[in-house]
Amino acid sequence: MPKSKVRKKAVYTAPADRRTPVKVKAAGPSHPVYIAVMLGMMLLGLAWLVVNYIAGDKVPVMMDLGSWNFGVGFALMIVGLLMTMRWR
């Protein structure tokens, strides 16, 4: 049986206007204030929950919030955790 002929494909070359390199600005490290706020939010949320468990019935603001204290504490911690995604 005869061998089939191999077809050569033309090599693809990108258009000239697409070959220009794009300079990307290197992102530097995060500002120390950003890191302090990020850690502060997580610690504030943790402290809110601890105070709620220990003395929640003696603090007037926490008595008024009732079960929403868990939402406040976890929301503060989640905001801190979301800030970690932009931390460099």
Image (cartoon, helix red, strand yellow):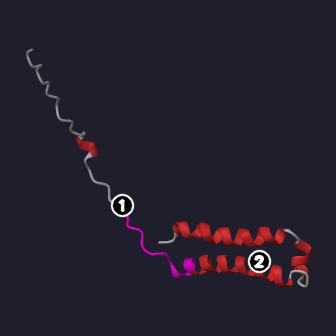
Residue 64, label in figure: none
The quadrant holding residue 34 is: bottom right
Relative horizontal placement of residue 21, taking residue 82 as reference (left or right)? left
Residue 82 coordinates in the image, percent (x, y):
60, 66
Is residue 67 positioned above or below 51 on the image?
above
Mark 2: give few (<14), some (14-19) or many (20+) Cα within 10 Å.
Answer: some
Residue 18 coordinates in the image, percent (x, y):
28, 44
Of helix, strand and loop, which one carries label 2? helix
Quadrant that contains the N terminus: top left
Magenta region, residue range? 24-35
Q: Which residue is mark 2?
A: 49
**Chief secondary structure of the magenta span?**
loop
Mark 1: give few (<14), some (14-19) or many (20+) Cα within 10 Å.
Answer: few
Query: Which of labels 1 and 2 is toward the front?
Result: 2
The quadrant holding residue 29 is: bottom left
As for residue 25 lying within the magenta part, the answer is: yes
Residue 24, label in figure: 1
The earlier-in-sequence mark between 1 and 2 is 1
Residue 14 coordinates in the image, percent (x, y):
24, 40
Relative horizontal placement of residue 66, taking residue 84 as reference (left or right)? right
Residue drawn where x is 65% and y is 68% of the image: 79
Residue drawn where x is 13% and y is 28% of the image: 8
Residue drawn where x is 55% and y is 78% of the image: 35
Relative horizontal placement of residue 6, taking residue 23 as reference (left or right)? left
Residue 74 coordinates in the image, percent (x, y):
72, 69
Of helix, strand and loop, which one carries label 1? loop
Relative horizontal placement of residue 55, taking residue 79 as reference (left or right)? right
Marks 1/2: CA–CA distance: 43 Å
Q: Amino acid at mark 2?
A: Leu
